[in-house]
Image: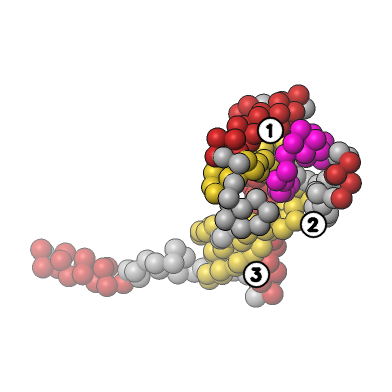
Amino acid sequence: MKRIAMLGLLLAAGCTQPADPRGVRPDEVLLQVAATGRAEAAPDEARITVGVSSNGATAQAASAANAQAMSRVTAALARLGVKAEDVQTQNLSLGRIDYGPGRGGYRAENLVEVRIRDVRQAGPAIAAATEAGGNVVSGPNLRASDPDAVLNRAYAAAYRAARVRAEAYAEAADLEIARVVAIRDGAGQPPVPYGGRYAVVEAQAANVAPPVQAGSDTYQVQVHVDFALKR
């Protein structure tokens, strides 16, 4: 009896089909779909780099002049509503000038990155900084303050696109979607700016706030979804 029971177990084991490593069952068909999703958002904050480059006959004179001018710049930004935690030093330098009209003297430079939490204040901030003595300006770099929220909308759109494509395949093959086997996150792409990004203009010399157009950014992502199809 033991030999018969053992033989029955071996036969049953031989009839069992091994599991598909892809996650589909014997009566299912695997469909792998890659889809792209996009979401747009208007930038709601700006980053600008402002600073002061000062020359002096001595290193001490250049440093002192630079410190005084930079204090005026940061004070002007503060009056505009920029908080201290939104101003970060990016570069401090002091060196001898070995060429040009100031040869033999010294040049001190101080650059800070300024976070403007309202895009509409980017132009006035640039004007205020230059009026206070800032002579090094670049930007603005416009961005969404919460990019993850925009990316999540793009991922949701990507999944919906994958589902629609899978339904089209299933209908054409006279099948239906049984379930989702796997979802894999594809690589997201940096936002693509649309619209104007014009900051520093000649009118800035007259302390006129330069125009800053926020436009919109398009965030693009990709997802890979595995569907199990069946009749």
Residue 114 position, x and y percent, is: 67, 37
In this image, 20 relative to 116: left or right?
A: left
Q: Is residue 152 magenta?
A: no
How packed mark 2 is, by other alpha carbons closer than 10 Å (few <14, some 14-19, many 20 or more), is: few
Label whose residue precedes the other's in the sequence (1 or 3) = 1
The residue range painted magenta reads 117-141
In the structure shown, which secondary structural element does the residue marked by tag 3 occupy?
Answer: helix
Label 3: which residue?
Answer: 170
Q: Please identify the quarter of the rendering in which residue 122 is found.
A: top right
**Residue 57 showing in the rendered view:** yes
Three-letter residue code for mark 1? Ala
In this image, 196 relative to 187: left or right?
A: right
Label 2: which residue?
Answer: 194
Instruction: Tell me the quadrant of the picture where the C terminus can be found.
Output: bottom right
Q: Please identify the quarter of the rendering in which residue 206 is found.
A: top right
Instruction: Tell me the quadrant of the picture where the N terminus can be found.
Output: bottom left
Three-letter residue code for mark 3? Ala
